[in-house]
């Protein structure tokens, strides 16, 4: 249970950090995407877009270091994204980009994205319950089990989680590349 919670925590951390930094690097584009959702008044879009990026980065850092509040923050953000996508899908607006960014990629709005976000929300709740025991600053400051929290075994688990994530990211990139090549060959 702890290992799965750690894996989910590291995965969500990587997802939020990559999305946050991707949006930060393309802030103008991110603001346009937020504006296209047509949920907020235009004057609030720049403030919201910046605040959202900072929240994603803070949640990613918090998850990395095993802070329970960060898992709940991830859940709240994922629920917010799911609601925004659902509102636009119900309006018939599936032609806009999700604005996910980072390793989540950019996709057109779809019910699949809502399902994905709700699945990730369940993962965030699981990580909040079971993912904070190892390699966690929260446990480090609240218990006497420093050896268990930052042991060689715990560090090895974190490295293993990142290795698995890298393989999954590589496989996803290869699938996307294959689709692009297939589309290119069909257009010629």
Image: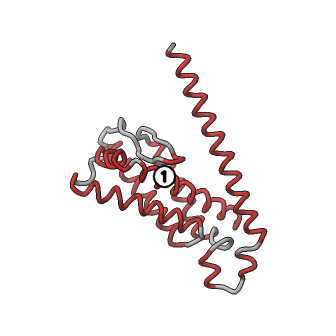
Q: Nearer the viewer, residue 23 or 165?
A: 23
Secondary structure type for disc 1: helix
In the figure, 185 relative to 154: above or below? above
Residue 99 coordinates in the image, percent (x, y)? 41, 46
Residue 126 coordinates in the image, percent (x, y)? 59, 64
In the figure, 182 relative to 42: above or below? above
In the figure, 127 relative to 17: above or below? below
Q: Please, which residue is most extreme toward the front here?
A: 25
Q: Nearer the viewer, residue 168 or 76?
A: 168
Q: Is residue 100 left or right of residue 62?
A: left
Mark 1 is surrounded, within 10 Å at the Cα level, by few (under 14), some (14 to 19) or many (20 or more) other residues, namely many
In the figure, 140 relative to 20: above or below? below
The residue that appears at 61% across and 34% down in the rendered structure is 175
Residue indicated by mark 1: 19
Residue 30 coordinates in the image, percent (x, y)? 36, 48
Q: How many marks?
A: 1
The residue that appears at 31% across and 38% down in the rendered structure is 92
The residue that appears at 29% across and 59% down in the rendered structure is 47
């Amino acid at each position: 249970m702890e290992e799965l919670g750690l894996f989910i925590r590291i995965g969500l951390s990587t997802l939020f950090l990559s999305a946050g930094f991707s949006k930060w690097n393309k802030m103008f584009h991110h603001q346009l995407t937020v504006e296209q959702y047509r949920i907020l008044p235009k004057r609030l879009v720049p403030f919201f877009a910046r605040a959202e990026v900072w929240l994603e980065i803070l949640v990613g850092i918090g998850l990395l270091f095993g802070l329970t509040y960060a898992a709940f923050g991830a859940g709240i953000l994922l629920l917010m994204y799911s609601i925004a996508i659902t509102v636009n899908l119900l309006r018939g607006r599936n032609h806009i980009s999700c604005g996910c960014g980072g390793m989540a990629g950019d996709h057109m709005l779809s019910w699949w994205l809502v399902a994905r976000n709700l699945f990730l929300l369940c993962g965030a709740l699981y990580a909040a319950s079971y993912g904070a025991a190892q390699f966690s600053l929260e446990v480090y400051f609240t218990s006497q089990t420093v050896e268990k929290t930052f042991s060689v075994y715990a560090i090895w688990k974190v490295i293993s989680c990142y290795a698995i994530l890298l393989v999954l990211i590589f496989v996803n990139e290869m699938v996307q590349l294959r689709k692009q090549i297939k589309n290119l060959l069909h257009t010629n």
